[in-house]
Image (cartoon, rainbow, N blue to C red):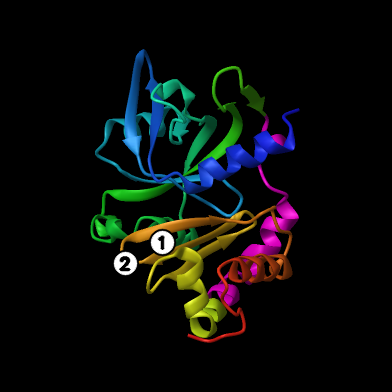
Amino acid sequence: MANAETIRAARALLRRARQGVLATVSGDQPHAALVTPATAPDLSPLLFLSGLSAHTRQLQSAPRCALLVAGEAAETNPQTAPRLTVHAEARPEADATLRARWLARHPYAGLYAQLADFRLWRLVVTGAHWVGGFGLAARLSPHDLLPDAAAVAAVAAAAEDIIAHCNADHAGTMAAIALMAGARMVAVDVDGCDLAAGERVVRVAWQQPVVDAQGVRAELVRLARATRVDPSASR
């Protein structure tokens, strides 16, 4: 089993990824495509895909796929970049809440997301491979990588209220945490939150995964104190 530091790094990389490479195959024809992922509360990658694209047609006939996301290289050698390959089964997803979550991560896509041939897909994780740099590789099972289901459900149930409260009563704190004027919280989960202003979106990670709404509050108080902002202050 991978150690806690590896799992935390892999999850954080997937949560903050705004682009990746989707690998698909149908028959004897492999294909790779640039895609723009977000993550569901349970860490499942979400993709908004056109039915006209080759990779979507391949997923429709052969849903097994892989998604590669990568971070910044520590040196000039690109091989020093951390990266995660997620192995998955792709399924069309009709949940409007997950659609909104994807759009919150990619607000620029609002126009083409209305086109009839686009739909949301969810990648159900079956495994993963993490490379943190030279000699730092680990295979991750879904049990290793995915967050605790009860914690995911608890935070998801409170997410709407958390987001509304933070934006209505602590807008100044959100902007200070994001280091971005006018930033508002647009998504929250067990690993962190997304703060956005216009089309710019910043991922803020918790120090440790949380298990409920009180854990989210504690992390926001910690972040507010780190930015020297009074968390009880209004906008």
Nearest the viewer among 111 and 211 is: 211
Give the main secondary structure, helix, strand or loop, of the magenta stretch.
helix
Q: Depth-wise, is mark 1 or mark 2 nearer the camera?
A: 2
Point 54% across, 73% down: residue:
163
Which amino acid type is shown beneath numbered disc 1? Ala
| Dot 2 alpha-carbon crowd within 10 angstroms: few under 14, some 14 to 19, many 20 or more | few
Residue 210 in the image: x percent, y percent? Answer: 71, 58
The residue segment tinted magenta is 141-163
Place residue 30 in its image quadrant.
top left
* Residue matched to label 2: 198
Relative height, residue 185 to residue 35 (above, below): below
* Residue matched to label 1: 104
- Say whether disc 1 or disc 2 marks the residue closer to the N-terminus: 1
Residue 2 in the image: x percent, y percent? Answer: 72, 29
Label 1, label 2: how many angstroms apart (C-alpha)? 10 Å
Q: Is residue 164 visible?
A: yes
Which amino acid type is shown beneath numbered disc 2? Gly
Q: Secondary structure at mark 1?
A: helix
